[in-house]
Amino acid sequence: MRRLLYIAASLAITLHATAQQSTTPATIPPVTQSITVTADRGLVGINDSATSTAILSQQQLEQAPGLALDDSLHSVAGFQLFRRTSSWTANPTSQGLSLRGLGSTGASRTLVVSDQVPLTDPFGGWVHWNETPELAIQQVQLLRGGSADLYGSSAIGGVIDVVPVEPLQGHPFLFSADALGATENTGVGDALLATATRRIAALAAFSMVDNGGYITTAPALRGSVDIPTNVVSESGRFELRTPAELHGIDAFLRGNVMNESRINGTPLQTNAARLWRYIGGADSDSSFGHGVLRVYGSREGYRQGFSSIATDRDSEKLTKLQHVPTDEFGFALQGSRTLPRAVTAALGLDLRDIRSTDDELATATSVTTSTSARQRETGGYADAVWQPRNWLLSGSIRVDSFRTFDGRQTLSNAPRVTPQPEIDELVASPRLGLVRQLPHGIALTATAFRAFRGPTLNELYRTSQVGQQTTLANSSLLAERATGFEFGGNFTLRHLGSLRSTYFWTEVNRPISAVLLSQTATTQTLQRQNLGQIRSRGMMLEAQSERWHGLDTTFGYQLAVATVTAFNSSSPAQTNLTGKWIPEVPRESVTATANYAASHIANFHLIASYTGQEFDDAQNQFLLHPYARFDLSADRNLIHGLSIFAGAQNLLNRSIDAGRTPILTLAPPRLVQAGLRYNLSR
């Protein structure tokens, strides 16, 4: 009933809004591939890297059928979540992401930011893909390649920048809304309202997903405890902004809230999260240079229940309840200036401070284990770009102090406090990039870097469970250290399109991995440990056509040979992993898109993807088969800013292996959706 009432209300808003012409373009542009890194936090508008960037506009994000932001990003080659499920079915703790074939655990080896502020979960390093209301996203930029030189921890594989919509002077009123219904008993609604006066501008946005879900356990293995995995999620944003014309400073204050609850496949395996985030900042341009200030914080409460499932999957028993409150505070301060001889330089300083407590209640003993700790990353960097004719040379270095301290553990049935190890690491992350522009639209690029990822509080202190696979914490983990390089070329042919090829090589020392301690026929117990070394090397090919008679296309291919190159675990149950594939990383992945604007009919969008085989465990025993998936959508403008759209994800309803933990689970089946969209600007 709640879902039906919400859809009805959203449709009423859409259909009864004041009729005006839409400002949405009639056709949707293709994914833009570029060697210009607009996600660069140091030098605004300057090409400060030789690494490729894919840019997806808001219209491009809307064209991909699905219920969350990560569904849209699958159209970019090399984008991979920890498992093959979408965030509208996956537990948040398995929503880490990977670029450049480096893999992930729950924690990401790729950093997600928005307006200079980290969006990765402060406790676990995973991503809440529903946090930002969909209509409040202007575009998403995917920077591939190590970027710790500017961003610090977790940017080993790259950075994803979620660029927000800002209320702007000159647009006194903007209203957008959409509502859709979908199979799997699903309803989705979004709304955005922005207004501006000469002195102040304001924006409010809201998104809601109510999904009935599907049973993830493979049909042959299901029992009476298996029920649909689903999510109910709401997110909201409010922002106030002063125009720079008043005092020469563009200042803003933004608040964001997300609330979601999930059923993870059985009646007792549930989780919920509520996240409040605030950001304040200012940008200033003067004759001296450009300055940026961001101050941010968040408060999150996360709850999860775990159970033990009988072998026949006809009964389960609650085993553990977890509650994790987390507080975060940080700031980023940057300044850049253009110097003589075609040099632009920047200096930056930032801090991220996290305080969290993990409370775990063992239902069998009624004993609560409480572990609290504090984690602080303080970093500073210098960045410079020299741009003589037809050349670009960029260099930067960042130094980070990464500390985990004040750790303590208590038991509810004992007064003793157990101190946890203090970890204090000093890390340097340099990078050097080179671009050579040649005649006839050819550019050659090269970059070399070092990067790191510090262990999250989740990896240090929290026990996790996915299906019947339990992973123990390890309070002695150290930061991952990465060294890598990339080189390639970009060719642009006027009126035809562009082609880019890249070779990449990244080696990660002390990667944090789940090492097997013991197993039975239906269960596994693992522990997070610093493994010896992993390496990902391969190539990426990307092509993009110009629009021709209403048709444009893109193509992406990634080959990633990602293996364990050194092994040092002492677990007697864990065999030597040297030469094994990194879990959850396919050797080959392909994406292709086609957009066709049929005059007076509709705009059609096809996304085709292929993912090769991969393994769901470090020993390469649990194979996940390759699959091909096709997503199709269409939209048509009606009158006065009103449009209709429809689409299908996994159009052919392929059965796709998602995980073996060790029980086989499946990715989402075919999802068919349809809805209305309205845009008003005056």
Image: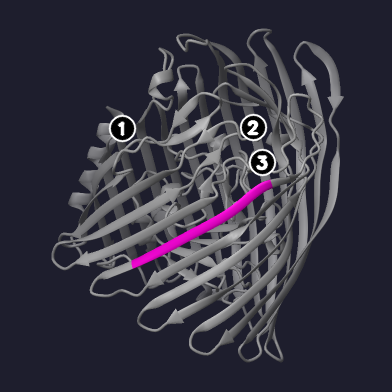
Q: Amino acid at mark 2?
A: Pro
Q: Position of residue 149 (x, y in %)?
A: 72, 63
- Horizontal side of residue 624 vs 575, given as left or right: left
Dot 2 alpha-carbon crowd within 10 angstroms: few under 14, some 14 to 19, many 20 or more: some
Earlier in the chain: of badge 3 and badge 2, it is 2
* Foreground tag (1 vs 2): 1
Whether residue 677 is situated above or below residue 340 in the rendered picture: above
Q: Position of residue 318 (x, y in %)?
A: 56, 12
Prevailing SS of the magenta stretch: strand
Q: Could you tell me which secondary element the residue under label 2 belongs to?
A: strand
Q: Which mark is residue 580?
A: 3
Task: Please state which of residues 326 and 62 is positioned toward the viewer in this rendering.
Answer: 62
Q: Quadrant of the N terminus?
A: top left
Q: Could you tell me which secondary element the residue under label 1 belongs to?
A: loop
Q: Amino acid at mark 3?
A: Lys
Res. 114 visible in picture = yes
Query: What residue is pinned by disc 1?
Result: 184
Q: Amino acid at mark 1?
A: Glu
Earlier in the chain: of badge 1 and badge 3, it is 1
Magenta stretch?
553-563
Whether residue 492 is situated above or below residue 146 in the rendered picture: below
Query: Is residue 560 shown in magenta?
Result: yes
Dot 1 alpha-carbon crowd within 10 angstroms: few under 14, some 14 to 19, many 20 or more: some
| Residue beneath the point at 81% across and 45% down | 403
Q: Which mark is residue 325?
A: 2
Q: Measure the alpha-carbon separation of dots 3 and 2.
A: 37 Å
- Horizontal side of residue 383 vs 215, given as left or right: right
Task: Please state which of residues 265 and 578 is positioned toward the viewer in this rendering.
Answer: 578
Q: Quadrant of the C terminus?
A: bottom left
State which quadrant residue 404 falls in.
Answer: top right
